[in-house]
Amino acid sequence: MKKMILIGLIIFIVIWGWGILMLLDDQKELNVVSDKDTIEIEVAKDVGMNFFEDFISVAPPANNIEIENRILKTLSEKALEEIGSESLIRDLALFIGIQDVPDEGIEFVDIKMNDIGTVLLTVQLKYSSTPTTRIIHLVYENESWKVDNITTSPQPSFSKSGNLTKGNPGSLSETWILVYEEPGAPAMTKEVIFAPSSTCAIAGVEVECETIDLEVGSRVKITGFVQGDIVEIMNLEYLEE
């Protein structure tokens, strides 16, 4: 009897130790992913900041073919469609959305990576009159970070009311899906995700998003930003039936 108890105890210790080792390995893997993301964000930041500094350095009357070529190599394929090498400075000014080069340079404000891997770098253009901000969208293309778009403060590109359902129910990758209607299309769907900056409201009163008891069938109005096939929620309003 004692022998059986001892064997059982040994088996329990082995299984328990194996479980601890697996947990440590998972945590180590998570830390590696986090460290990798941090490094990539820093690399993307350097690309975005250097892009602006290069643009300022070649503004008229300056002229430097080497720097101009470097700017072109920094742009994504989509961005290059808007910019021609023969009218580079003019096209870049339109691309950035400015008329004059910031006379006091630029300053880093914020940076983050969204859920689809786009890095959003916010910089302040320092004019002696009135500073302004721009958001540089950087994408990973051809094994390097590229400037893909430049916007002012984000404007929501999606605003629909509908009902929530779950994607991949029962799995670890459950996601919220908004089912809504368009003229002639009664069952459109979009995956929706919360961001740290997301806000929520019930009957027009702002509440913490975590306090809303969302469930399949909940009727909501979602305003946010389309990122590929996903909508990043800027605001979710819970609509009472």
Image (cartoon, rainbow, N blue to C red):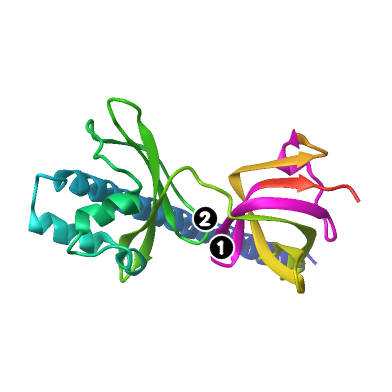
Percent x, y of residue 198: 63, 44
- Region in magenta: 206-234
For disc 1, the marked residue is 22
Task: Determine the image quadrant of residue 158.
Answer: bottom right
Which amino acid does the dot numbered 1 rest on?
Met
Percent x, y of residue 186: 79, 72
Where disc 2 sits, the SS reads: helix
User: 10 Å neighbourhood of mark 1: few (<14), some, or many (≥20)?
Assistant: few
Residue 3 visible in the shown view: no
What numbered label is drawn on residue 124?
A: none
* Location of residue 55 with respect to 191 vertically, above or below: above
Q: Nearer the viewer, mark 2 or mark 1?
A: 2
* Location of residue 207 with respect to 231 vertically, above or below: above
From the viewer's perspective, tell me whether residue 40 is left or right of residue 6.
left
For disc 2, the marked residue is 27
In depth, the one of 183 and 227 nearer the eye is 183
Q: Is residue 39 magenta?
A: no
Residue at 19% of width from left, 48% of height from top?
54
From the viewer's perspective, tell me whether residue 157 is left or right of residue 219.
left
User: 10 Å neighbourhood of mark 2: few (<14), some, or many (≥20)?
Assistant: few
In depth, the one of 58 and 3 nearer the eye is 58
In depth, the one of 197 and 12 nearer the eye is 197
